[in-house]
Amino acid sequence: MPCLYLIPTPIAENAAHTIPPYVAEIVRELDTFIVERAKTARHFVKSMEPVRPIQEMIFEEIEPGGHSTGKICEAARTVFREAIAAGKSVGLLSEAGCPGIADPGAGLVAMAHQDGVRVVPLVGPSSLLLAIMASGMNGQSFTFHGYLSPKRLELARDLRRLEQTARQNKQTQLFIETPYRSQMVLETALESLSPDTRFAVAQDISGAGELIRSLPISMWKKGQIPSLDKLPAVFLIG
Amino acid sequence: MPCLYLIPTPIAENAAHTIPPYVAEIVRELDTFIVERAKTARHFVKSMEPVRPIQEMIFEEIEPGGHSTGKICEAARTVFREAIAAGKSVGLLSEAGCPGIADPGAGLVAMAHQDGVRVVPLVGPSSLLLAIMASGMNGQSFTFHGYLSPKRLELARDLRRLEQTARQNKQTQLFIETPYRSQMVLETALESLSPDTRFAVAQDISGAGELIRSLPISMWKKGQIPSLDKLPAVFLIG
């Protein structure tokens, strides 16, 4: 029976070793992919040494142009349904990491369930999960919030709200930020949070520049502040 | 520099293929492990074909007897600090899946950060993450709650509270259950939740009995109810 494979991709440069070989074996046999971005997806699939020439494969973007409407475009729906009807399995690929987590892929997975198509999640790197593991914060209860407000004043308010929730519910609070705003988030957190609140940053996990620091705010202020400007980051309060 | 490796283990029978080879390479070189349960940890390390005889290695349990106090026992602290002081890296192993997530390992990770020891999370299977991916529910915002109440009436109340939070915050709500209570959770959810609420069950992910079903409650009621009694399960509302 054809199925929808959820295919993880590396989350750092030169981190192909984080993809288990059984994932490569599955990718090699597929020829239809629904993807976040066609260019990077083609590059990844090519690196898995597929059995067919890459030119004969279909790479259909979930939302061409990356408009983040959260909707699956009509072309992607059609490609998915035609492949399944023809008895062929389909691969779902995120830009980096696990499809369906902090990316627009979930809509296609929901559609597969509605259509009665088997969904098979494959094991691979997730910056969120690795960040929770490595933070030493509570992994029995946590919330992922996506992005917080991009505006400094509202961000400070968001951070204090998360700090309060973390304390009241004994629950780790997790969010992400783009490269060019990560430094501002770190500075705002150090200014806004209580000295005894635990705060963590994770960047380039599994890569050459892996940075994972998890300390109370008071300890952060005593040490040198790392430069976060070049890569996306995961932040944790707990 | 010695470090603390966070080592994932398979989450299903005969699922060694979900552990990337670089993890095996790291495990092979270690001889000191802090673990959730010594017996299963020894079995896993042996399967990685370590360079030293298993009898010469240290497997120290975080909480001997599995008392779930959330505290690292004195013996485990000592083993960790002595190994690091001797320049040797230490591995942290959970009973299944990723250490620090829904297990007692987080305390040791926090201790490593306090001691200034580098923490290195390795890539592997996590039933929680794979369940979110495969649910098709919102992966941009989610909360993991650990276990809900074991009592049926309180469980029904918890489920309705999660349903309300999922709806109000557009946030996927995630929890786990032990094998012998999973069937009761499924039945209580089908009785307690609204027909249009999306409900998912994931069991034995990456194993031979992989079960992943994600549907509105109304659709669940129309189909055959699966038997969940033999394995732990992840449940999602979204």
Image (spheres, coloured by chain):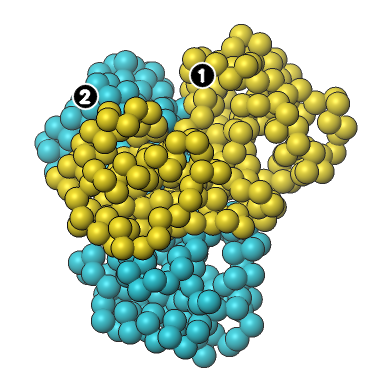
Chain colours: A yellow, B cyan
Amino acid on which disc 2 is placed: Gln
Q: Residue at x 40, y 75 (%)?
A: B34
Quarter of the figure that contains the C terminus of chain B: top left
Q: Residue at x 57, y 25 (%)?
A: A117
Residue A11 placement (x, y as % from top left): 59, 45
Callout 2 secondary element: helix
Closer-to-camera residue (A128/B189): A128
Q: Residue at x 39, y 33 (%)?
A: A146
Q: Is residue A61 above or below residue B28?
A: above
Residue linked to disc 1: A68
Residue linked to disc 2: B164
Closer-to-camera residue (A122/B112): B112
Q: Is residue A91 left or right of residue B74?
A: right
Q: Residue at x 79, y 39 (%)?
A: A46
Callout 1 secondary element: loop
Q: Is residue B102 above or below residue B107?
A: above
Residue B25 placement (x, y as % from top left): 64, 70
Residues under labels 1 and 2: Cα distance?
Answer: 26 Å
Amino acid on which disc 1 is placed: Ser
Q: Is residue A59 left or right of residue A199?
A: right
Residue B96 seen from this side: yes
Q: Chain of mark 1?
A: A
Closer-to-camera residue (B114/A121): B114
Residue B165 placement (x, y as % from top left): 23, 27
Residue B235 seen from this side: no
Residue B208 placement (x, y as % from top left): 56, 48
**How many numbered circles does the render carry?**
2
Residues at marks 1 and 2 on the same chain: no
